[in-house]
Amino acid sequence: MSETDIIYAPFQPSDTRLLTGSNNNQLLVDNPILSSILAKIFPYLLIADNALEIITWTNEDPYTNFLFIIIYSIVIMYWNSISLVILPIIMALVFSYMIWIVNSTIFDIKYNEKPTIDEILHTLHNITVRFEMLLKPIKKSDFKAHNFIQMFVMTVLLTPVHLLLINYALSPKKFLWLTGLFVLSYHSPWSYSLRRLLWRSVYVRILVFYLTGLDIKLNMESKSKPINSKSMEHALSDLKVLNKSVESPTRLKQTILFEVLENERRWIGIGWSKLLLPSERSNYCFPHTLIQTVELSQFSPPVFNDDLYSYSWEWLDQKWSIDKEFSKNKNNGWKFFDNSWENGDFIDGFSKFTRSRMWTRRAVLCIDKRTKVNDK
């Protein structure tokens, strides 16, 4: 790599790659009635696409977006001066600009070059992608009943703080101006990059968790996967062999006990939650090595690849059960620890901020010697 090469971080929204600007010969519509209807509504589709293009900041030259931000800022910050004289002029100019855009678009489509079916379908596709970008924050927010209750409680608790900010630190005018800037620039590339950088901080995630009550992932690691042959050594150290039997010279049968720890942390004002710190153990892990694993409903036995032997699993227990010996049959299987997962106790207290319980399930492992060995 030369010294003049520049590497850019991929902070752009991935949805913008779905937007198309060239024709595709495979998009054909043979129905003449449908073609006529699409041609008639194409001017209005184009207007909607242009409007969404500005809102989602996917236009080639975002000068229009900055123009709207400047006009909005001037109107809000100098409302007392321009509300009687300049504001009607600005409203008339904006209204005239919108009418001119609509009329020119409709005139060009009707009396100039007619759109092709591919252009109409591309416009429909772009509208769909931009609507997905616009509604993506709402679709990704998993709001439930307890989330709304949590937000309502936090709103009531933060109301005095909000009143103090409005009265002493931030005037209503500046608050409205900052809120408008956040909304107008939400889909801009630099705003998207800033949010992604802030979201990397665990403190920001904890703050959003307290404000919204959403089940936010605090750990930056990828989703857990079932253990496989790559982690065979670690998997074997967490397996407990209960019984062995030789059924034939080529077949060995073992009864294996799987043990998985379920971990939770107590948050002030929230209670026990599955949200854990990035530096500690995961929600589900093995007890000895503390290696992360999947939830119990998605758990599958390890897969071992061997040229000499074949391995097959069969669950002996129908479902997972709580290990009563782990918690001395108290507190529904939970054992409580301090903030560092130490000093375990079977009784909850003010100094206990973490807890774990053991889940167990038996399975039968059959090991068969291969009749043919694959030599390469």
Image: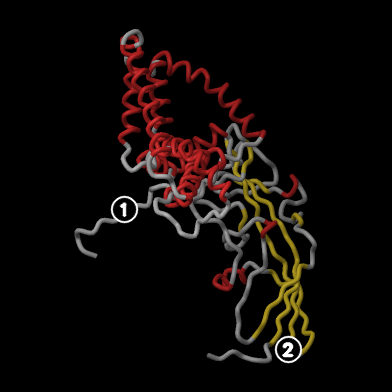
Type of amino acid at the residue the image marks with label 2: Thr
Q: Amino acid at mark 1?
A: Tyr
Q: Nearer the viewer, residue 274 or 78?
A: 78
Residue 258 visible: yes
Q: Inspect this view and state whether residue 186 appears.
A: no
Give me the disc on residue 75.
none
- State the image coordinates of residue 242 (x, y, percent, origin top left): 75, 71
| Residue position marked by numbered label 1 in the rendering | 8
Identify the residue shown where x is 63% and y is 67%: 238
Q: Earlier in the sequence, mark 2 or mark 1?
A: 1
Front residue (pair 19, 258): 19
Q: Secondary structure at mark 2?
A: loop
Point out residue 374 in the picture as x, y percentages from the top left corner. 59, 89
Secondary structure beneath dot 1 equals loop
Looking at this view, is 29 or 201 the one in front? 29
Task: Give the vertical position of 329 relative to 367 (above or below).
Answer: above
Residue 179 vs residue 355, the one in the foreground: 179
Crowdedness of circle 2 by 10 Å Cα count: few (<14), some, many (20+)?
few
Disc 2/disc 1 C-alpha distance (Å): 57 Å
Residue under label 2 = 250
Q: Residue extending furthest top?
A: 84
From this view, report whether residue 275 is shown above or below residue 363.
above
**Which residue is drawn at the image coordinates 60% and 66% (left, top)?**
227
Measured as percent of width and height from the top left, residue 120 is found at 47, 47
**x%, y% of residue 54?**
39, 36
Query: Above or below — where is 290 with respect to 35?
Result: below
Residue 19 falls left or right of residue 255: left
Q: Quadrant of the N terminus?
A: bottom left
Quadrant of the image occupied by residue 76? top left
Q: Residue furthest left?
A: 3
